[in-house]
Image (cartoon, rainbow, N blue to C red):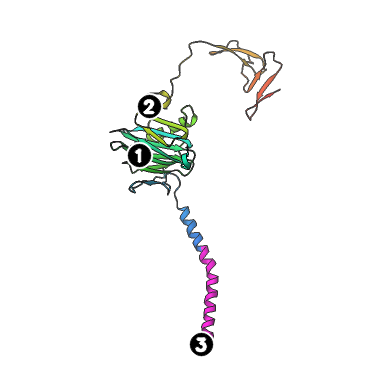
Amino acid sequence: MSRIKQRLLALLILLAGLKLCFPIYRHIYKLYIRSSQEQLKVGWEIPKETEQNNSPEQFESQHQPPQRLADDAEIIFVSGYKSERNLNSDKVKVNIDRPYKNVLLVLSSYDRVNWDVEASPNTNITGIVLGSNRSSTIVANTNSREVYTADFPYSYEIENKNFVAALEQLNRWFEVDKIDAFRGSYALPGVISISELDPIDPALTLAGYPIEKSTTNSQFDFSNCNYESVKWMSRGAIARSKYIRPQTGIAVSPDRKEIYKLTKAGKLRRT
């Protein structure tokens, strides 16, 4: 009986020890998980969801994509706010057919998009830049094994400050001053096929449309610091006065009985 009691006592001690040690083990495990997450790099990283056919190697960078991707390459930019989500799918298929050409493909969106890129056999995709405010994914059936994620602006219109920001970012990375083809839409269609470059358009360049000097000297009115109407021309004020300095953010009625001021909220207030 004494042996049985000793074994029972040893078992009870073992169970008590396990009960005491379990919280410690759980705490150590949480610290390990947290440490693993903190080791994830921020910036130019390929999300876990990113896939490519035949499991090609994917290059990661904490800084920027290599400038060589744009060497002798056409820049094709596809961007939108979101996908059309046909049949509850956010997949957007991009077909590139530029035989015997080097192509740097830039994809960006605000919402999550599952990109599916396919290039014709003789199209050389030098690399793909993927920008998104959400966790977009990509499947690339191309010869390129280089996919870079980036903090890159989206723009579905050329006449938009984000489009200019995209041009400026590409210039900083690759020293290019234009985009050769642009496909933009608020809701990206399920299939986008690109086989031709866009016609030459200054709007697709970093310089934009050239500024032309006005051939006429227009005349208009400004309100000075005393809220008086002063005649100006495009070359400057017509009459010189110590009160000539224009008043900004205000508008005065022709009879000078009412003054409107632009508030910080962007609204006009009558005074």
Taking the magenta stretch, the answer to whether it contains residue 75 is: no
Q: Is residue 80 visible?
A: yes
Is residue 144 placed above or below 222 in the rendered structure? below
Q: Position of residue 81 (x, y in %)?
A: 49, 36
The mark that comes first in sequence, 1 or 3, is 3
For mark 3, what is the residue?
3
Q: Quadrant of residue 255?
A: top right
Is residue 188 placed above or below 57 in the rendered structure? above
Q: Position of residue 261 (x, y in %)?
A: 66, 23
Q: Of all residues shown, which one is farthest toward the front?
A: 87
* Count of numbered labels shown in the rendering: 3
The mark that comes first in sequence, 2 or 1, is 1
| Magenta part of the chain | 1-27
- Direction from residue 40 to residue 103 in the image, left or right: left
Give the Cα separation between the discs numbered 2 and 3.
Answer: 91 Å
For mark 2, what is the residue?
198
Is residue 166 placed above or below 200 in the rendered structure? below
Determine which of the numbered discs, if any, sits on residue 118 in the image: 1
Q: Is residue 179 visible?
A: no
Say if mark 2 contacts mark 3, CB within 8 Å.
no
Element marked by disc 2 = loop
